[in-house]
């Protein structure tokens, strides 16, 4: 018997594109069992358009659940509410402004059926503009995800990769419903997709796929978007970094280290690595305001090559920390 699939679709003022996304979900070769829509207090025409677009789903036997109470929760809490309401074997996350290719559900289901122990899967995507025209770059290219990254993850060594930096984008994510029960509650310091990815990696079963069965729309109003990783873009981000970034990384890392200790089945070497990462990020957050005085602290934080092991840009983040703006 094929695995059942719930779609967790979160909305917020998405009237412009949400009908196209729902049409692409309903047009899947393997249709989902259930669609859960969680709205984050939209004040445009999103909800009327969602209800109209989903009328045919209910008539065809797909269970539809609409959630919303008029209060803004933010992205992570909104997705947490949607996922908690899902009841199928597999949950597939959906943004409100993308378009799924017709094989997305069936490809994901087949992957989970072939690997009964797999908890979490994410894939590539085609980046498109507001009109749906390809931008000539894929999501993996924009995120600079390498063949080496994919090989390590798919060979079972995902945790060190995700501990260094997140590679999962929610618009391409699917996972077994049981993962959410292990990962909940989703912490405020993390985005939902990256938290589910790191917990699944800690439990040892993540797949990253080359498939690009989503058109990931970039339109200037994305809550979370991506850009081509040009040298100019990377240098611009580095030079614009403030000390708040290191404070946030330290808080996130402390949360991860604490939570992993309470999740059954996480190997001790992973909890130890998370604790070391938390210490490293705390030292970065404590670097002195004066750039002239930071160099010794950066040197000390790098003992054991910890920038290469834990920082998202590796040793390049040593320069970022030296140039941090107050």
Image (cartoon, helix red, strand yellow):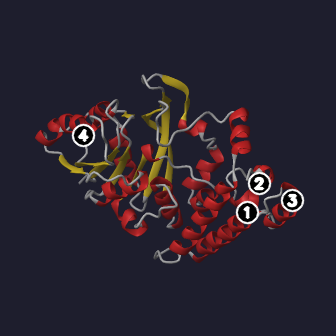
Residue 105 located left or right of residue 313 = left
Residue that badge 3 annotates? 295
Residue that badge 4 annotates? 47
- The residue at the point 13 percent across, 40 percent down is 60
Looking at the rendered structure, the secondary structure element under dot 1 is: helix
- Hey, which quadrant is residue 100 in on the image? top left
Residue 104 located left or right of residue 277 = left
Q: Nearer the viewer, residue 20 or 271?
A: 20
CA–CA distance in space, label 4 to label 2: 44 Å
Residue that badge 2 annotates? 321
Residue that badge 1 annotates? 284
- The residue at the point 65 percent across, 70 percent down is 273
CA–CA distance in space, label 3 to label 4: 53 Å
CA–CA distance in space, label 1 to label 3: 11 Å
Q: Compare marks 4 and 2 and give the one earlier in the sequence.
A: 4
* Residue 205 in view, yes or no: no
CB within 8 Å, label 1 to label 2: yes
Q: Compare marks 1 and 3 and give the one earlier in the sequence.
A: 1
Could you tell me residue 276's position as x and y percent? 68, 71
Q: Compare marks 3 and 4 and give the one earlier in the sequence.
A: 4
- Hey, which quadrant is residue 303 in on the image? bottom right
């Amino acid at each position: 018997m094929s695995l059942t699939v719930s779609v967790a679709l979160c909305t917020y003022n998405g009237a412009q594109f949400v009908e196209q996304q729902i049409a692409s979900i309903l047009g899947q070769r393997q249709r989902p069992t259930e669609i859960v829509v969680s709205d984050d207090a939209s004040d445009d025409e999103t909800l009327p358009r969602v209800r109209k677009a989903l009328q045919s789903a209910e008539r065809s036997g797909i269970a539809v659940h609409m959630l919303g109470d008029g209060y803004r929760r933010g992205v992570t809490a909104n997705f947490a509410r949607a996922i908690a309401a899902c009841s199928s074997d597999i949950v597939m996350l959906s943004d409100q402004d993308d378009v799924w290719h017709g094989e997305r559900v069936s490809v994901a289901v087949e992957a989970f059926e072939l690997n009964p122990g797999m908890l979490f899967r994410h894939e590539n995507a085609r980046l498109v503009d507001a009109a749906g025209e390809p931008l000539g770059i894929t999501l993996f290219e924009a995120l600079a995800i390498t063949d080496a990254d994919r090989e390590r993850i798919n060979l079972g060594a995902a945790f060190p990769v995700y501990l260094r930096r997140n590679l999962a984008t929610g618009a391409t994510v699917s996972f077994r419903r049981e993962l959410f029960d292990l990962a909940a509650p989703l912490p405020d310091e993390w985005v939902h997709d990256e938290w589910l990815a790191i917990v699944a990696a800690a439990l040892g079963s993540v797949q990253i796929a080359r498939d690009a069965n989503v058109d990931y729309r970039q339109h200037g109003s994305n809550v979370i978007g991506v850009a081509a990783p040009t040298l100019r873009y990377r240098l611009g981000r580095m030079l614009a970094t403030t000390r708040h970034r290191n404070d946030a990384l330290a808080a996130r890392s402390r949360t991860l280290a604490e939570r992993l200790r309470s999740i059954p089945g996480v190997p001790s070497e992973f909890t130890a690595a998370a604790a070391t990462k938390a210490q490293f990020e705390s030292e970065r957050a404590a670097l002195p305001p004066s750039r002239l005085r930071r160099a010794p602290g950066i040197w000390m934080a790098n003992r054991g090559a910890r920038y290469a092991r834990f920082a998202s840009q590796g040793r390049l983040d040593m320069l970022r920390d030296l140039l941090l703006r107050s």
